[in-house]
Amino acid sequence: MDSFELGRLTDHDFEEVCRDLFTELLGVPLEIFPRGRDRGVDLRHDPEGGPCTIVQCKHWYRSGRAKLLAHLADEEVPKVASLKPDRYVLATTVGLTVDAKEKLRTAFAPHIRSTEDIHGVDDIVAALRERPQLVERHFRLWLSGTAALGALLHKGPLLRSDWLRRELAKVAQTFVPHEGFARARQLLDEQHVCIVTGIPGVGKTTVARMLAAWRMGHGWEVHEVSQDIDEVTELWRDDVPQLFLYDDFLGQTTLPPQFGKNEDTRLLSVMRAIRDAPDKALVMTTRDYILEEARRKHDRLAAEDVRDALTGIRLTDLDLLTRGRILYNHVHRSALRPRQKRQFAARHAWLPVVSHRNFSPRLIEETLRIDLKREPDVATAMVANLDNPRRIWERIVENELSDEAVHLLEILFTYESVELVELEETWTWYSKELDREADGRRFRHALQVLDGTMIVIDEGAVSFHNPSIADYIRFHLSAGRGQLGALLASCGDMRQLERLVDAGRLADGGGILAQLMELKQALTSAVLAAEDTVDDNREDHLEWALDTAETIGSSSLAEYVAQRALELPPWSENTKDLLQLANSLDGSRLITQEVSAEFRALVDEHVSSQISERVATGWVEVNNWYAYLDEPIGWFAEGTLLDDMVECALEKLRELAADPGDLGETSIDYLEALLSFLTDNDAHLLHDEEFRAVDRVREQLTQAREAAWRSLAERSPDRGRPVKLPPNSRHEQAVVAEFMSGLGNAESDGAG
């Protein structure tokens, strides 16, 4: 790595490299300072009571020296004069002559001490060359070493070397290291063989290519295997470090014909030979479900050798910061016009993408490649594609899976999560309803094909591997590709029926709803049969059943609701749901006025009883109940009951005004509820001084909470690595917002 193509770096990449480099060169810790159009600060060291140092990073790789000098003189000199740093350092990816440096030193005097504080691209490359450990920390930087890139794909009989060279360069521009990549790299270092598995679109091939690039950057030859494992034997050269890249080694969609010709035996032989060779490595990729199918048909692929080499790439490997960097890199390097790129600098454009439950690097790439010419608002189109990832799953479900596996997915769709035993039982009922053979062998086969790919089995519970799979199965059923009548008849749990009906209510579930309207009697029968599986919240269940009856026009289902509702109030503990059900009964065209009036009277009596019980225990219980109902409750009270509630609240107000005690941020909602209740009932006027005292406490706690969040959001990541915080935290969003803002920066000098 004797040279570096800094043009491969994004603006944010360049700033992170400069932070680490100039921390060493200047001998002071530098933080990445959140950018603003008027500040002119990228990096800084500003100790309390000490000299302030500012480092400005100008990644103007293609702009040229004259344009850079003019910009610095017109835009940056006034900013530096306003900031008044003790020391100002300039770093740029533009080449600078001696005369250019002298002009800059004069323009920025006295803040630039000497031309040694002006670093052009040649100075930066020379400094990096002397710091290989620093280069190692920045993935895209070491990948750009021209010696490595220029030599490795030209040694030996490489297949499609031009294509592979282009693909590696393309992937390197947008790849962001993540936990899945780190696991795969560690496995490759330890085992010399790594099989990268995962669902379509999650980034298996990208990780495999970057593993190849990693070894390539350390002097290894990289060879692509395109036909079968025998190519490794042909390409093998003793005493030469070689990595063999075998993408989709089990076929892209189905097992290839060669696996009927002892390919499994030869594959294991090569894997074992490479595992024993210190200068050889093998990276393979495959889809999970194809691997499971292969292991079912070929026992040798279930051997310990294969299991030890497996690693998976999961969506959970891509945290919010990683997703943000992936999106930034793809947009920055895309063919979008500058105006379109600037759209992604806005939080409302990037946040729905990076926080989307179906986030997929493949969908990001495909949207930018396909929709940029058809969609004026690419950011909106990207979210729409993430909302509907149908193109990923349709080919698999409709063309590649066995009927037994598809039926298993259809059954699983009716559950949030289900125990394996219950899943098999329901799948068996469904198969019999379809007049198909159902036995344990067929079920286990379907389970093996899907496990780890489309479903996850965790401690005996089965669920979908990815929410987008459930989205597709909803489309599959809505399109009439399943047998909804048989599915209804096989559902023995009310949760399943609720999920099916709820799916029909979604915007893309119209086909399911139309089928349910034709099957309304079958649905009512299924509800009655599953009644004993309803959990403790029968109010919520009856609310759902009434809504369903209204939706599909089922008088028999409405009659079921009317009968069961009148049994509820005497023993119910779900007051809020009782109130909601009363409102629904009042407004239903399928429920008689007599039934709704009788139910309302029972509920009112129940609520009054609940108020009396809580008033007797004091304001804490009243407040908890008040917050639980989430609506004003004064209108329930008659006579002295409301007065008793107000007195409870005033007693607590006086107590807090005299001594707030150990109130903290968790008490803010509690205080707001107390003050709101008193205000709603004009009781705050009775004790205005105490009211204002407690309100001041609430305001102080609120301000303290906001200050803590601001401090957290301004904290820079430690040496380019994200601070580990809860997912979707404000800090993570702040960091993503910082580098996404570069897409709206007129100085950005990326592709396109």
Image (cartoon, rainbow, N blue to C red):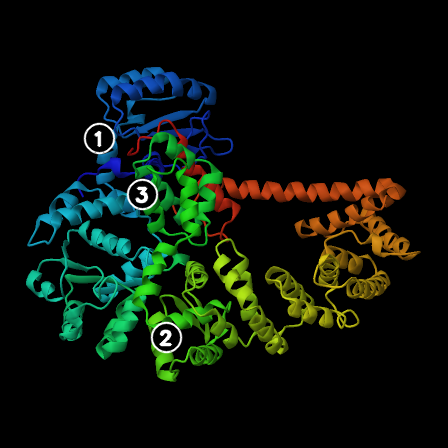
At 16% from the left edge and 47% from the top edge, which residue is drawn? 165
At 10% from the left edge and 66% from the top edge, which residue is drawn? 230
The answer to whether residue 54 is above or below residue 699 is above
User: Foreground: 504 or 346?
Assistant: 504
Looking at the rendered structure, the kind of residue marked 1 is: Asp
Looking at the rendered structure, the kind of residue marked 2 is: Glu
Packing grade of label 3 (10 A; few <14, some 14-19, many >=20) is few
Circle 3 is placed at which residue position? 370
Q: Position of residue 202 (x, y in %)?
A: 34, 56
User: Foreground: 238 or 330?
Assistant: 330
Packing grade of label 2 (10 A; few <14, some 14-19, many >=20) is many
At 34% from the left edge and 56% from the top edge, which residue is drawn? 392
The answer to whether residue 124 is above or below residue 491 is above
- How far separated are the C-alphas under marks 1 and 2? 63 Å
Q: Earlier in the sequence, mark 3 or mark 2?
A: 3
Circle 1 is placed at which residue position? 122
Q: Is residue 719 visible?
A: no
User: Foreground: 157 or 387?
Assistant: 387
- How far separated are the C-alphas under marks 3 and 2? 35 Å
Circle 2 is placed at which residue position? 404
Q: What element carries label 2?
A: helix
Quarter of the image where one finds residue 452: bottom left
